[in-house]
Image (cartoon, coloured by chain):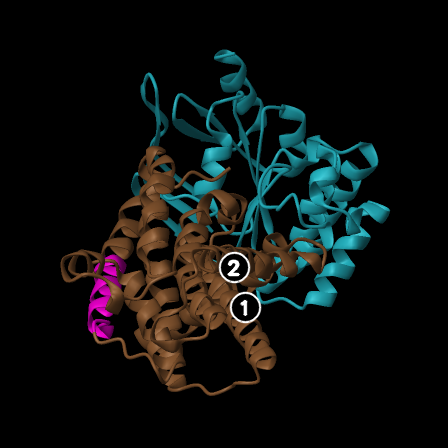
Amino acid sequence: MIRLEGVTKAYRTTVGDHVVLDRIDAEFPEGVSVGVLGRNGAGKSTLLRILGAAEQPDAGKVVRKGRVSWPIGFAGGFNGSLTGEENCRFVARIYDADLDEVIESTRAFADIGEYFRMPVRTYSSGMRARLAFGLSMAIDFDTYLVDEVTAVGDTRFQEKCRKAFTERKERSSVIIVSHQLKTIREYASRYAVLRRGRLEMYDDIAEAERAYEANA
Amino acid sequence: MSTAASPTVASSFVTGLATQLRVIHAVALRETRTRFGAHQLGYLWAILEPLFWIGTFWGLFALAGREAPNGMPIVAFLATGVIPYEIAMKTADRCANAISGNKSLLFYPQVKTLDLVIARGTLEGATYGAIFLIILGGEALVTQHFVIDDVLLVCVGLGLGCLFGTSLGLVLCTLSVLSNSVERLRGPLFRPVFWMSGLFFTAESLPTNVRDFMLWNPVLHCVELVRDGWFASYHARHASIAYVLACIVVLLFAGLTLERVVRAKVEVT
């Protein structure tokens, strides 16, 4: 469960403060997967970073219950000069997980062959996504924060991601952000639209779609 | 990290501390790889830099026909200047870059700016501590003279240097979140310290008015303390542990306060 209470976040730019999240109140209930729709630049990634406590809001409060993952995507979280395996080792250490288990299960899931022992900077964005996704699956979280990662890989990988989440549906939920309705539909049972700094929740995907298309 | 039903202050402090130590350990191990590179040669480079300065000053001393003061052997005299200087200022430099070098790690909620700085400070301290042992151990083997006057004082000097560097680095690192110009100012601000830290002179040998000015530099105190501890023939009458400690406390206070202030402003990419 994650609850946002009056969460506000602005970034300083050369043309003044740009408010990305504007006094958002929302609750992501336990065991319910939520898909957040938003155009490019709507603040989806910022929202995920704040949900995952990678960044602090300027105002407001975030209440979390259970273990929340870091924002899983193809950007960030990895050091380019280290190999995939070394990055796994680091993450396993800070989450107090078994090193060998995490490395083995990530290697199996990511399925990137020899690249696993090569510096992450040599990876394509698809391979980064595979590594990030595999690694997050190797550590048990109650809530997974996913940043369009599944949209990157090929069909087979997308299928694999879906299967992995279906398998752990009982234990974990997903908060996924995307600009694609299709992605959201596959994972979520509740929906939200992020635009102009506000977050609106919908139970029905058709409603969410209407709201999303309306301000296209 | 566990979500105990009603954690007492003590137990949440313990779990918090355990998490922080785990994070610092993981970051330090990771930094070992990025600092020294994938090859063992990386460690060699770390030793070559102080050796280069020792060699340069040795050459200059030879050219000028000068000897080390107070009957100190020249190489040991220079090494006890260069390495304590590096343990302080290289640490400050590395810690000041802690965020920019590790930005991607802040993605993980349990990794904080402070952890990045502490990890770097620890790694630099250990690195230069080892370099100190290797270079001065090598010197002792060559000169067949191995008597340390006061081991504790040597450790105090090196330890204070590392702490001072880490605290200064913390201040610079947090300031760099607020303004980019801090990074540009660092070079010009650090350079004079190299010439003012007693790498090739002692505080004792300076004229009074110059010395009084130079003694504002805490790094000079650290160098003096190390030399006092290393050589039986040198007594650092002007070095003050209390002064260096005071500098560290002031910097730590400023750095930890700034860390609080900029915490929400660190942008993660």
Quick one: label 1 or label 2, which is nearer the N terminus?
2
The shade of chain B is: brown
Please state the horizontal and vertical placement of residue A117, each as a whole percent of the image.
Answer: 78, 51
Extreme-right residue of the structure:
A113
Query: Residue B131: which disc?
Result: 1
Query: Closest to the observer: B6 or B117?
Result: B117
Quick one: SS at disc 1? Answer: helix
Cα distance, mark 1 to mark 2?
Answer: 9 Å
Please state the horizontal and vertical placement of residue A40, each as a whole percent of the image.
Answer: 53, 21
Q: Looking at the image, which residue is at 47% across and 42% down?
A: B100
Side of A47 relative to A213 (left or right): left
Find out whether residue A159 is within the magenta segment. no
| Rendered view: B47 above or below A50 | below
Identify the residue position indicated by label 2 in the image: B50
Q: Amino acid at mark 2?
A: Pro
Side of A5 relative to B237 (left or right): right
Q: What is the chain letter for disc 2?
A: B
Please state the horizontal and vertical placement of residue A152, each as a whole percent of the image.
Answer: 71, 31
Dot 1 crowding, Cα within 10 Å, few <14, some 14–19, many 20+:
many
Q: Read off the magenta span.
A: B238-253
Q: Amino acid at mark 1?
A: Ile
Side of B43 relative to B268 (left or right): right
Q: Quadrant of residue B155?
A: bottom left
Quick one: SS at disc 2? Answer: helix
Q: Quadrant of residue B185?
A: top left
Magenta region, mostly helix, strand or loop? helix
Q: Which chain is cyan?
A: A
Closest to the camera, between mark 1 and mark 2, is 2
**Res. A212 visible in picture:** yes
Dot 2 crowding, Cα within 10 Å, few <14, some 14–19, many 20+:
many
Find out whether residue B243 is within the magenta segment. yes
- 1 and 2 marks in contact (CB < 8 Å): yes
